[in-house]
Amino acid sequence: MRPPRPSSCSKCSSSSSSSYSLTATSLKSRLLTIFKKAQELTTLCDIEACVIHYGPDGELKTWPENRDIVRSLALRYIQLDQAKRRKKSVNLHEFLNKNKDKKKMTDNFKKAKRNVE
């Protein structure tokens, strides 16, 4: 049986409040990254986009900060019929499968090219 760790050990000294603080800090930095990526996407692709985030405490944060713009974009999205909503929508599972298929096709092409040579 392993002897107990001293209380000064870093794994034991983390309290729930410091754990919460680390999680909150991580969430905040990730949220800033998402906002930055949305801004880059709208600039580079010349599209309209918004980010709506409800924090763990229920606080609403949006990008852009102008809620009227976010509201109008969300309403336009809601008014689209289901077919148009799904047309260009991609979830994580579909994205990963598409990339896997693309990689498989590339590998098959490389093998065929080697066999020809």
Image (cartoon, rainbow, N blue to C red):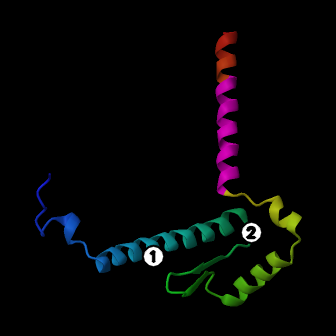
Q: As shown in the figure, which amino acid type bears the numbered disc 2? A: Ile
Residue that badge 1 annotates = 28
Q: Residues in magenta? A: 92-109
| Image point (75%, 80%), residue name | 74
Q: In the visual, does 104 lie left or right of 58?
A: right
Q: Which residue sits furthest front?
A: 1
Residue 110, compared with residue 77, is above or below; it is above
Q: With respect to residue 105, does 55 lie above or below?
A: below
Which residue lies under the disc numbered 2? 47
Relative height, residue 82 to residue 72 (above, below)? above
**In terms of image quadrants, where is residue 35?**
bottom right
- Residue 96: x and y in percent read 64, 47
Q: Is residue 112 above or below residue 98?
A: above
Q: Position of residue 92 (x, y in %)?
A: 65, 55
Query: Neighbour class for label 2 at 10 Å: few (<14), some, many (≥20)?
Result: few
Q: CA distance from mark 1 to mark 2?
A: 25 Å
The residue under the point 70% across, 11% down is: 116
Marking on residue 54:
none
Query: Which residue is painted at 72% across and 57% down in the image?
Result: 90
Q: Main secondary structure of the magenta part?
A: helix
Question: Which quadrant holds the C terminus?
Answer: top right
Q: Find numbered disc 2 in the image and state the secondary structure of the residue it sits on.
A: loop
- Front residue of 65 and 5: 5
Q: Taking 69 as reference, is 15 left or right?
A: left
Residue 6 lies in quadrant: bottom left
Mark 1, mark 2: which one is toward the viewer? 1
Q: Nearer the viewer, residue 110 or 87?
A: 87
Q: Position of residue 67 (x, y in %)?
A: 67, 89
- Mark 1: which amino acid? Lys
